[in-house]
Amino acid sequence: MNCRRRGCWILLFGTVLIIAMSGVWQRPADEVLPTEPLPLLAAAECDSAQAACVARGEGFALELSLGPPVQPMQPFGIQLRILQGQLSSDATVVLQFQMQDMDMGQNRYRLIADEQSVWRGTAVLPVCSRGRSDWFAQIDIQDGERRWSAELPFTVIAQQ
């Protein structure tokens, strides 16, 4: 049989289509798709660089403290405490610092839990070329199939 004939190509295409539709080419059963994060909400007037800010959601709450002080181009400390709920030792806590409507590059930091289950890290933020100081910390927590997210505002202090 010569596969250059049109009928052979149609048969081959049909076979591939049937295999694809039958589910043979599926995602592995143990691959877990990330769930949508549960939002954690904080008070709008919160400034986590001035005082600890709390974000709450369904059965989960955290407290974020940055610095003090938080200045551009200067390392500052990050502390995140879980006030309600629990995280396993395999949990991942990531903070990404951003400005609204302004690309400030990749400012992403993974926090590590200490002996007291306080998640800690150190960060450095760039100088804004427009002189803005209004930032927010985007928090993403993943613990197995559970996820939470929060955005907490803060203000940097101008360099002296």
Image (tube, grey):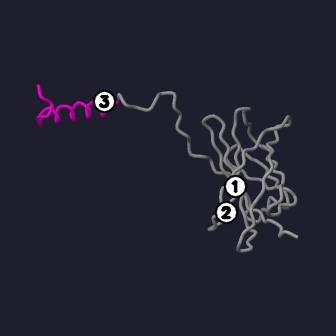
Question: What residue is drawn where x is 76% and y is 59%?
Answer: 125
Q: Is residue 4 magenta?
A: yes
Q: What residue is shown with label 3? A: 22
Residue furthest top in the image: 1
Which numbered disc, 3 or 1, marks the residue that appears first in the sequence?
3
The secondary structure type at the circle numbered 2 is loop
Where residue 86 appears, x then y in whole percent? 74, 37
Mark 3 vs mark 2, foreground winner is 2
Q: Is residue 79 left or right of residue 135?
A: right
Label 3 is placed on what type of residue? Ser
Q: Is residue 35 magenta?
A: no
Q: Is residue 15 left or right of residue 45?
A: left
Q: What residue is shown with label 2? A: 104
**Residue range (magenta):** 1-23
Question: What residue is drawn where x is 37% and y is 31%?
Answer: 25
CB within 8 Å, label 1 to label 2:
yes
Q: Nearer the viewer, residue 72 or 83?
A: 72
The secondary structure type at the circle numbered 3 is loop
Where residue 55 appears, x then y in whole percent? 73, 53
Name the quadrant of the C terminus. bottom right
Q: What residue is shown with label 1? A: 107
Label 1 is placed on what type of residue? Asn
Q: Main secondary structure of the magenta part?
A: helix
Vertical placement of 143 versus 124: above or below?
A: above
Label 2 is placed on what type of residue? Met
